[in-house]
Image (cartoon, grey):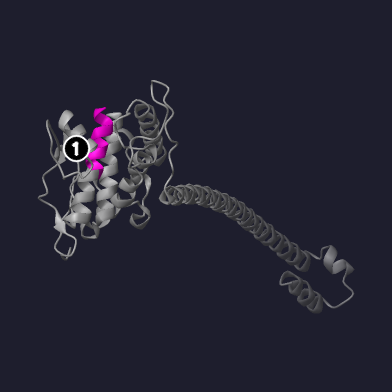
Amino acid sequence: MCVVGFLHDLQDGMLYLHDVKHIIHRDLKPDNLFVRTGAGGPQIHHQHQQQQRQQRPVLVIGDVGLAKQVTRTMSLVSAAGAVAYRAPEAMVDAARCSAASDVYTASLCAVEIVTGKQVYGACGDDTAAKRALVERAKAKMVEVLDFAEDSDMTVASAHLLLGACTITAPAERPTFTAIVAARSAAGNGNNSNANGRQQQAPQAPQGVADQVAVLRRQLQEERDARQAEVDAAKREVEKAKAAAAEAKLEAAAGEDREAAADDLDELAIANKKNKKSWQAYIEKSLQGGGALTDSCIMGRTDCAVWALSLIHI
């Protein structure tokens, strides 16, 4: 099975770069993975594995133009790697590329090898879609490994590699040492073969439990983040409602102030008219001896003073 073999070669090749040559590739992508017939790649000490490579196409890692020795400074590193295959930390700062960044990009390549779909091309920034694609790749590997009797690849090892691209924190990704260690030493060991020969059940490495815990923690963090977004949206809605209510009250208060001003204007006009009427009445009474002077028991002058004083009240 070429898919199983290619994932096997990818794991071995990256383990060789990291643990033997102490090199970070920094530009892993399908364009830099080559296939050739015959034996190739890092030397394998298991005879049956070497024979397998001689009988099938071999995946070879090439184009290390952006590679750096692990011990060298990364301060002069430019934007490393193709964007579609770049680890999250490299998106922020290319100088932060590390061995964990290679694990992330190798995982993207592995998912593409298994499913035939580029992760970012198919999912973009949709985390849920990305996880769904990775789960499909894992399920497909379970089916493929049922028929891969000659390979020492295990479900646990394949799943560690495929799932690494869903782990954002570099420190929480598995190393290639752990990924390769998850493979059994005596063959597949995952399932019963087609002839009904019972094979040994896989022994999950300790790292798998850690990865499960990490995935659960990430899922909870995503749920918390979504809940925080919902809460923030609710607060914004409440603020908008309060602002609308305040604007409504202000508009009503403005209308009340305008109505009160109109009432005052009308009252002032009426008061002015009344004042003029009183003045005319008093003057007429003083001149013609009207009702005011007839009923006044004071003298004419005192009565006039009293009447005029009423006008100013």
Q: Quadrant of residue 182?
A: top left
Q: Would residue 119 be counted in the magenta stretch?
A: no
Q: Nearer the viewer, residue 72 or 153?
A: 153
Quarter holding the C terminus?
bottom right
* Structural crowding at the residue carrying mark 1, measured as other residues with C-alpha within 10 Å and reported as few (<14), some (14–19) or many (≥20): some
Drawn side of residue 160 relative to residue 289, left or right? left
Predominant secondary structure in magenta?
helix
Q: Nearer the viewer, residue 255 or 135?
A: 135
Q: Can residue 308 be seen in the rendering of this structure? A: yes
Drawn side of residue 147 relative to residue 257, left or right? left
| Residue type, mark 1 in image | Gln
The vertical placement of 270 against 130, above or below, is below
Q: Position of residue 156 (x, y in %)?
A: 39, 41
Q: Position of residue 140 (x, y in %)?
A: 37, 29
Drawn side of residue 260 relative to residue 227, left or right? right
Q: Position of residue 300 (x, y in %)?
A: 81, 75
Quarter holding the N terminus?
top left
Check disc 1 and report its element: helix, strand or loop.
helix
Q: Nearer the viewer, residue 32 or 89?
A: 32
Q: Which residues are magenta?
A: 1-11
Q: Quadrant of residue 58?
A: top left
The total of numbered circles placed on residues is 1
The vertical placement of 302 against 33, above or below, is below
Q: Can residue 85 be seen in the rendering of this structure? A: no
The vertical placement of 67 against 114, above or below, is below
Q: Residue furthest top?
A: 195
The residue that label 1 is drawn on is 50
Residue, x 76% and y 77% (percent of image)?
305
Residue, x 19% and y 55% (percent of image)?
20
Q: Nearer the viewer, residue 160 or 112?
A: 160
Q: Would residue 6 be counted in the magenta stretch?
A: yes
The vertical placement of 146 against 11, above or below, is above
